Amino acid sequence: MGWANLRRDVCLRLASASAAAIVMLVSAPSRAVESTCFGTLSNGRLQNGVKLPLNGPNFSSYSPFASELGRTYVHSKVLEVIVAAYTALEKSAPGRMFVYGETGRASGGHIRPHRQHQNGLSVDFFVPVRDRTGRSVPLPTSAANRFGYDIEFDKDGRFEDYTIDFESLAEHLYQLQAAAKTRRVGIALVILDPPYLPKLFATARGSFLVQNMKFLKRAAWVRHDEHYHVNFAVNCMPIEDYHARTSTTTPATVSATPRSTPAPNFSSRRKSAERASVKSG
């Protein structure tokens, strides 16, 4: 009996230790090392980039396929801010659905067709919308509409059966700002189609946004109607440091979009008229 009890006790201890190890693995952050950004938004690279989670209780990626292609990597601090904001939105905006778009590659650098998104600090978020019944739903994004980037909202924020939910958009920006401040991350700029700014500033969070966030007041090189672009601010090393590091080591492999897979087309029929000298998006 004594030996049987001892064996049972050992098995229970091993099972308990295994369960604890699994819990630690599941609850541990998705990154082992903090990311390092180099250069600028439009001339930069990223080291130890982390991929945004594919989905959560109230958010999803614009495309699981694009995520697999490596187009949704960010700086580790940016990931913390984004996930924390979505978590806060579960309480402050229950039942609202959000979709994030393009971010960047694991090692940064140019990602067609964006001018920025090169050092892990630029993120596109698709506008939250309501359907004809007033229900909050994800904006439909697929290859048929260039993964959402070919959707065109009118001056009132309407597209087919969908209407931009400016209250939810404002709440998301508020929670991003709150999460960023807590983590000592800045938000350098938000780009949304300028005609929509009065609607955004008329929301419950509007006065806070006006006082605490910087918005591009003129048209960017493409119209930002179906998505809003957010540039985060993290201290980055000079781009020369990245080149110095990689000149003595083998560069990390970066997954590239196959030629047969179209990237979002920002030069479509309605985008070309919006071009300006502002290098953003």
Image: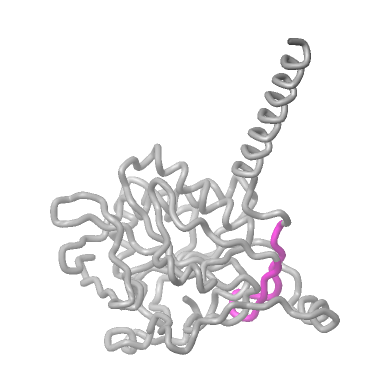
Which residue corresponds to the image point at 38% horizontal and 83% vertical from the top-left? 266
Residue 71 is inside the magenta segment: no
Q: Is residue 61 above or below residue 275?
A: above
Judge from the rendering whether residue 265 lies leftward or rightward of residue 22; answer left or right: left
Query: x and y percent of residue 45 in the render?
Result: 67, 75
Q: How is the image coloured?
A: one colour
Q: Nearer the viewer, residue 86 or 172?
A: 86
Q: Is residue 251 or residue 230 the one in the foreground?
A: 251
Q: Quadrant of residue 15?
A: top right
- Specify the farthest residue to the top: 1
Q: Is residue 43 magenta?
A: yes
Q: Which residues are magenta?
A: 34-47
The image position of residue 164, as x and y in percent, is 26, 60
Please state the horizontal and vertical placement of residue 152, each as a whole percent of the image: 26, 75
Residue placed farthest to the right in the image? 248
Q: From the viewer's perspective, is residue 61 above or below residue 274? A: above
In percent of the image, x 75 and y 75: which residue is there? 238
